[in-house]
Structures are given as structure tokens and as C-alpha cells.
Amino acid sequence: MNRIAVFPGSFDPFTIGHESIVLRAVGLFDKIIIGIGSNNNKMSFFTAGQRLEMIRSLFAGNDKVEAQYYEDLTIDFCRRVGAHFMLRGLRTSSDFEYEKSIAQVNQVMLPEVESVFMLTLPEHTSINSSVVREVLRYGGDVSKFVPSNINIRKYIQ
Ligand code: ADP
């Protein structure tokens, strides 16, 4: 069996916290598919196409990591791509409570997909996409929070 994991999220934008989770998990799986979900509760800052391009360019040299956009339920995306694992990062206890309920519901709906959680590195605990977006809105420098291979300025007019 190919061990395929989906790493779902909004990735608006992709941060060094996300990158770290992917790089630390890559040895556990044959393939990690970064799934950019269309989250109806969130107005996105970057378009789906921009987020896809940023992530694909970042992992262009790594054939175990790919990125796709999906508009349906995450478990349906997992089913479609043949994933048996769903990878999520945990920063705080509130992340844990939130992730626990999602994982338990997903488990009922699609038992063949196992959720796998990875604790963030301590230095990445406070990094999240919404703070990065806020800094970007006011023209600040986000280079310490976004992988250096992503040229985020290119996507901001
Ligand atoms: P979502 O909208 O699903 O929360 P995000 O793009 O914010 O999407 O996050 C995707 C995944 O990455 C989630 O599992 C989240 O907990 C994890 N994550 C976000 N930021 C970090 C970070 N700094 N360190 C580790 N994991 C993170």
C-alpha cells in the first residue's frame, strides 16, 4: 500500500510552520498531498491559484510532496486521491480541542483514513497565517514567517 497523506488547510499563506510540519512528516509517508481547501467561512487573501503556485514552487524539487486545490469535503478529497492518512499540526491546547472533534467526526465518516498529529516546533507556536495576513495588509515584512523560497511580494500589488 502506498502511504499517502493529505495535509489539508487554507495555507493563506503557507508559513514556515506549515513547511516544518511537511518536512518533518515526509519520511513517514510515500507521498504528502498538501490540500488547499476552499473554506467558506474564510475570505481568502491569496487566490487558490496563487497559493497553489507558491506551494508548488516551494516543493518543486521534492517529488514526495505535491499540492492540489479541492472544493469538496476533506474526507472526499482523501478518498479521491487514495490517502489513508490526514496530517495536521498542533500548536496549542485549543488547536487540540478543535482538531479532536474534527478527527473524531472524520473517523466516523471515513474510518480508513487515520488522522496523524504533529506537534509544532516551539519556535513556530505563535506563527499563523492570519497574523501574516495582518502584517501584509499594512505593508510589513513577513520574511521571517514565510519560507524564504516563496517570493510573496510577487503576489501583492
Ligand atoms: P485551517 O484553516 O485548516 O486551520 P491552516 O492553513 O491555518 O488551515 O493550517 C493547516 C494546518 O497547519 C493545521 O493543522 C494547523 O494546525 C497547522 N498549522 C498552522 N500553523 C502552524 C504552525 N505554526 N506550526 C505547526 N502547524 C501549524
Image (cartoon, rainbow, N blue to C red):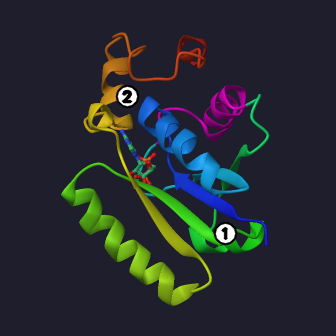
Q: Nearer the viewer, residue 152 or 78?
A: 78
Percent coordinates x, y for residue 33 in the rendering: 68, 52
Query: Is residue 21 among what the camera can see?
Result: yes
Say which residue label 2 marks. Answer: 133
Q: Is residue 133 left or right of residue 79?
A: left
Q: Is residue 106 left or right of residue 62?
A: left
Q: Residue at coordinates 38% horizontally, 16% vertically from top-left?
A: 144
In which quarter of the view is residue 81 placed?
bottom right
Compared to residue 80, the image places residue 123 above or below, namely: above
- Front residue (pair 1, 93): 1
Neighbourhood count class around disc 1 (C-alpha, 10 Å): few under 14, some 14–19, many 20 upward:
many
* For the residues bearing labels 1 and 2, Cβ distance under 8 angstroms: no
Q: Position of residue 27 (x, y in %)?
A: 63, 49
**Residue bounds of the magenta highlight:** 44-59
Within 10 Å of the Cα at label 2, are there few (<14), some (14-19), or many (20+) other Cα atoms? some
Q: CA distance from mark 1 to mark 2?
A: 28 Å
Horizontal and vertical percent position of residue 99: 35, 66
- Residue under the point 66% across and 27% down: 58
User: Mark 1, mark 2: which one is toward the viewer?
Assistant: 1
The residue type indicated by label 2 comes to Arg
Q: At x 49% / y 89%, what residue is drawn?
A: 108
Q: Name the image quarter holding the C terminus.
A: top right
- Would you name the residue on which mark 1 appears? 78
Residue 55 located within the stretch drawn in magenta:
yes
Residue 59: x %, y % from top left: 69, 32
